[in-house]
């Protein structure tokens, strides 16, 4: 009698596991939900999860990756349904989660020691001054710059620009050689953000947000130059800029349609997939004419956090620690072509290893758009501006939107 | 003798409970939150009518209302013209008219999102490529990337999809007209044109009313077409009201504010539908 019940439950568990492991809360059997925002990383995480499950029998990890993950996550918060383990971009969304008080505090966790302080501080700043302590582990770091076609640069005998004027001269040179300098895909509004961040982060003063909050400055004062420069760059594209989207941009750039592509290094994987023979390099977009001051825009690509009142806090923590282990991070950054936030694993990919010295010298700054108020659609506002060319209206809208959103 | 509760009560009760908990309650909750500054989570407090007042000064909201009305009116008119023409054609004594009815109904079966993504490809890659090869310079850039013309693309997809359903309703209406009326008018020497205006159209007037109301209501609530085609862009050129509520309400952390918007939106749709029915039904009686 007892034996048959056991057989039944084993069979049931097997069926459940086969169906993708919904439920599965039998004896000693724990299922964790891992809410994961990066579509590019699904395969890599599948590989890591398989390894984790092998090392930790009894724990099943279910990866959940949805389109528009920020929206889904926020709407789940309204129902108090927080996933066990969450991976978010170290931007506005992370700050929202921390302020909503749904993440476990990890300030005293030893895994935090291995993480580069700069990145822990970066995400702490995003959470805001009213929050004490740390609530997530920076996992990987990205960068945002100009991806270029090395073969084309060699053929034309071009050099990496150090200042804004050199950058424009470079674009001119490419144009007069009969090639297209940039491929842009502003039909999908967020693709304006990589060049916009490179410009804004370098042009605005470092304490811009503090000043803004204190009412000492405004977007009108600081963003005029950003708008002008972004508009100037648009002159060096030839494709149907507002009718193209990100995936098309990756495809076309891979086919050699343009010499440069202003995107984050996260795009490199897809470009190489579309054309495995392409030789790429990356350089920071030189936003000003002061070569010393131009910095690379880099941010925390992925923050790992666990739910404050999840059902399985220990197992969730275990999974997070597993992902932060050197060997697993190395696998992750090799496949995803990012940089590790934990000291140890190094990026060896040829295309982006050029950026390694920039990181080592610390010539980096963080994404401007990570500090705007939530719901601040700067990409849509700039998209409108680039289409209509009305700078006064843009600056006006930036200020009034900021006022509206920070006032509520 | 004690009266036993009727069997109807027991049949009705579950439906009432389900309706109340999944329909009425969320609506009441939404109305409740529209008087607060709730972000969807965390702490909140009452702000009175603040949200409502702010919406009337919100450029994004006004822009969304403007776009949605423009889109809905144009689409409603087009859908009714097109589906009436198709219905008249399908009602005529032609070969394969049953097969054709099936084919014309196809767009309604397909998911709008999938159709939208296919059209997205057509508008932004297929048409520009053909235009480039044939030298039509006006069409070489994607219509979806133009703030002035993107709405036309959405009208095309929405009308293409919605015409199927309205055609079916018109066909049902045409089936109710007795054939002897046409025979009588033929004896009197009426032309085809007179036949349509004096017999067909007046007799399907109730179907015209319901088609106008349904189409208008559906187009005012347009959502998936836009998600699949433009995502509300470029800029905010094609952001409909429901898309604005969804995008800013969830991702923008303006849950309570957009709840207020949703309440206004609901009132607007109900008012327009009632108004339409009143006007159009009056016309029916007069005829």
Image (spheres, coloured by chain):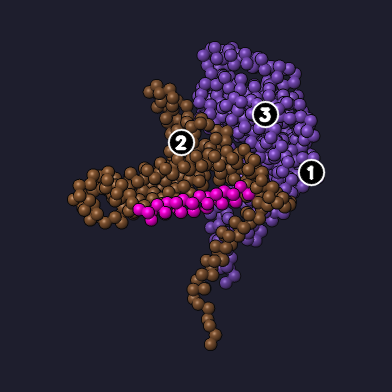
Residue B78 is labelled as none
Query: In front: A171, or B184?
Result: B184
Front tag of 1 and 2: 2
Residue A197: image quadrant is top right
**Can you give x and y, in whole percent of width and height, for residue A322 in the image?**
69, 44
Q: Mark 3 points at which residue?
A: A395
Quarter that holds the C terminus of chain A = top right
Which hue is chain A drawn in?
Answer: purple
The magenta region covers B260-287
The chain letter for the residue carrying disc 3 is A
Q: What element carries label 3?
A: helix
Residue at horizontal 72 percent and vertical 50 percent from the top = B47
Residue at horizontal 65 percent and vertical 42 percent from the top = B252
Q: Name the residue under label 1.
A: A131
Q: How far apart are marks 1 and 2 (CA)?
A: 47 Å
Query: In front: B84, or B119?
Result: B84
Instruction: Based on the picture, tell me whether residue B283 belongs to the magenta stretch.
Output: yes
Quarter that holds the N terminus of chain A = bottom right
Residue B153 is labelled as 2
Q: Residues within 10 Å of mark 3 (few under 14, many from 20)?
A: many
The chain letter for the residue carrying disc 2 is B
Image height of A89 relative to A149, above or below:
below
**Can you give x and y, in whole percent of width and height, for residue A90 in the image?**
69, 38
Q: What element carries label 2?
A: helix
């Amino acid at each position: 009698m007892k034996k048959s019940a056991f057989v039944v439950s084993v069979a049931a568990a097997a069926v459940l596991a086969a169906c993708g492991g919904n439920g599965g809360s039998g004896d000693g059997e724990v299922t964790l939900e891992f809410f994961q925002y990066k579509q590019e990383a699904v395969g890599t995480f599948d590989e890591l999860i398989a390894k984790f499950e092998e090392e930790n029998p009894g724990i099943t990890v279910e990866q959940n990756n949805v389109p528009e993950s920020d929206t889904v996550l926020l709407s789940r918060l309204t129902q108090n349904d927080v996933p066990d383990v969450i991976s978010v971009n170290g931007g506005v969304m992370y700050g929202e989660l921390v302020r909503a008080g749904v993440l476990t505090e990890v300030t005293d966790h030893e895994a935090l020691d291995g993480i580069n302080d700069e990145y822990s501080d970066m995400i702490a700043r995003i959470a805001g001054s009213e929050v004490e302590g740390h609530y997530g582990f920076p996992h990987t770091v990205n960068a945002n710059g100009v991806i270029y076609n090395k073969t084309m640069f060699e053929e034309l005998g071009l050099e990496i620009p150090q200042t804004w004027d050199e950058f424009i001269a470079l674009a001119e040179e490419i144009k007069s050689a009969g090639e297209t300098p940039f491929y842009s895909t502003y039909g999908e509004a967020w693709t304006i953000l990589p060049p916009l961040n490179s410009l804004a982060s370098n042009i605005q003063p470092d304490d811009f947000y503090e000043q803004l909050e204190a009412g000492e400055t405004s977007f009108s004062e600081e963003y005029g130059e950003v708008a002008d420069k972004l508009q100037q760059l648009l002159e060096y594209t030839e494709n149907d800029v507002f009718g193209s989207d990100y995936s098309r941009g990756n495809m076309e750039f891979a086919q050699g349609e343009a010499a440069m592509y202003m995107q984050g290094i996260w795009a490199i994987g897809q470009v190489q997939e579309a054309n495995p023979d392409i030789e790429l390099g990356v350089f920071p977009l030189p936003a000003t004419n002061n070569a010393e001051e131009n910095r690379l825009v880099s941010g925390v690509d992925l923050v790992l956090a666990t739910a404050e009142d999840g059902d399985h806090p220990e197992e969730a923590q275990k999974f997070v620690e597993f992902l932060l282990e050197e060997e697993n991070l190395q696998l992750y950054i090799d496949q995803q072509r990012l940089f590790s936030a934990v000291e140890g694993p190094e990026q060896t990919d040829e295309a982006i290893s050029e950026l390694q010295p920039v990181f080592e010298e610390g010539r980096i700054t963080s994404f401007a758009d990570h500090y705007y108020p939530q719901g601040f659609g700067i990409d849509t506002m700039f998209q409108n501006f680039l289409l209509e060319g009305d700078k006064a209206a843009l600056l006006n809208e930036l200020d009034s939107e900021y006022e509206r959103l920070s006032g509520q | 003798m004690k009266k036993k509760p009727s069997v109807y009560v027991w049949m009705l009760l579950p439906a009432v409970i389900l309706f109340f908990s999944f329909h009425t309650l969320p609506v009441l909750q939404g109305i409740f939150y529209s008087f607060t500054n709730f972000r969807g989570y965390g702490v909140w407090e009452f702000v009175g009518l603040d949200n409502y007042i702010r919406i009337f000064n919100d450029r994004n909201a006004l822009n969304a209302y403007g776009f949605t009305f423009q889109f809905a009116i144009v689409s409603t008119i087009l859908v009714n013209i097109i589906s009436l023409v198709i219905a008249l054609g399908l009602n005529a004594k032609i070969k394969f008219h049953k097969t054709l009815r099936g084919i014309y109904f196809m767009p309604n079966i397909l998911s709008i999102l999938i159709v939208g993504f296919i059209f997205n490809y057509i508008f932004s890659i297929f048409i520009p490529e053909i235009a480039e090869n044939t030298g039509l310079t006006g069409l070489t850039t994607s219509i979806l990337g133009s703030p002035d013309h993107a709405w036309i693309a959405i009208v095309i997809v929405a009308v293409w999809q919605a015409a199927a359903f309205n055609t079916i309703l018109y066909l049902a209406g045409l089936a109710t007209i007795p054939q002897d009326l046409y025979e009588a008018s033929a004896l009197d020497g009426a032309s085809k044109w007179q036949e349509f205006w004096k017999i067909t159209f007046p007799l399907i007037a109730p179907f015209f009313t319901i088609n106008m109301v349904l189409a208008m209501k559906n187009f005012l609530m347009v959502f998936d077409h836009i998600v699949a085609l433009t995502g509300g862009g470029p800029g905010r050129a094609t952001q409909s009201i429901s898309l604005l509520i969804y995008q800013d309400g969830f991702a923008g952390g303006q849950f309570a504010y957009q709840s207020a918007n949703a309440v206004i939106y609901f009132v607007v749709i109900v008012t327009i539908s009632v108004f339409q029915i009143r006007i159009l039904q009056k016309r029916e009686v007069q005829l």
